[in-house]
Image (spheres, rainbow, N blue to C red):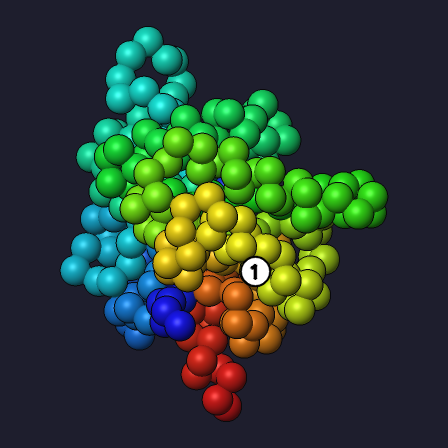
Amino acid sequence: MTMRKPAIAGNWKMYKTLAETRAFAEAFPADAKNSTDPEVILCPPFTVLNALAEAFKGTAVQVGGQDTFWQDEGAYTGEVSPVMLKDAGASHVIIGHSERRQFFGETDGSVNRKVQAALQWQLVPIICVGEKLEEREAGLTDNVVIVQVQRALLNVAPELVSGVLFAYEPVWAIGTGKTCASDEANRVCGLIRETIAKMATPEAAAAVRVLYGGSVKPETIAEQMAQPEIDGALVGGASLDPSSFAKIVGYRTAAAH
């Protein structure tokens, strides 16, 4: 049994100016800043990525991009490459978030190209998978998730798979206030792991961390983290507030009180 170190990642989406970013870093409590178990990763907009990395220098907080392009450079107006993310201080990058799939034409194919580019530049991909409401209601959840995982990892060397993070984000639970029941989220996270075992190796699957995302709050985190297949959380709205995000990071202490 591999002991997987939990990871709590915050996705700021399209929020926060430079001033707000610095204020967040200032207000984020010291114990959360220095947490290594769980690991803490914050993914802000590109415009404040470097400022956030600088503000958290010397702490345990890691910084990630919310998306990347698959080329290192070139005539791709509006895109940001993995090289630029690294240069700005990122160690991680979210790939295939449902909002990218829904609003910006992200496909399983482009997710795969981005995953390979990120790995080439030693960025840790946080690969998002999950079903829409109509897919869940039609009983297609497992099928959708398995296919997304398989296509994301196409042609990825098995030895690189263990370092990837996955996030199970049921699309119907993102920003809706609806949360997937913990036991069901656990089941799907287990399914992601099974799929990885078949594509790479059982060892890689045992090492891969699978996060849950979808209206994660300080009130729900302890129950989610108690599930054996859930190794952390990808937090949206609650990551924008330093004290609520710190409560999620400190879920063990909260549970002990």
* Extreme residue in the top direction: 75
Q: Position of residue 137 (x, y in %)?
A: 82, 47
Q: Which residue does the image show at 43% across and 41% down from the upper left?
A: 94
| Left or right, 146 with reference to 1 | right
Q: Which residue does the image show at 68% across and 63% down from the upper left?
A: 184
For mark 1, give the secondary structure: helix
| Left or right, 242 with reference to 82 | right
| Left or right, 137 with reference to 86 | right
Residue 104, picture quadrant: top right
Residue 112 seen: yes
- The quarter of the rendered structure image containing the N terminus is bottom left
Position above or below: 47 against 131: above
Q: Position of residue 37 (x, y in %)?
A: 33, 71
Q: Position of residue 51 (x, y in %)?
A: 26, 44
Position above or below: 255 against 197: below
Position above or below: 55 against 186: above
Q: Which residue does the image show at 51% across and 25% down from the upper left?
A: 109
Q: Which residue does the image show at 30% across and 46% down from the upper left?
A: 159
| Left or right, 214 with reference to 65 | right
Residue 155, picture quadrant: top left
The residue indicated by pointer 1 is 190
* Extreme residue in the left direction: 58
Disc 1 marks which amino acid? Gly
Residue 88 seen: no
Q: Position of residue 222 (x, y in %)?
A: 54, 76
Front residue of 35/13: it is: 35
Residue 158, picture quadrant: top left
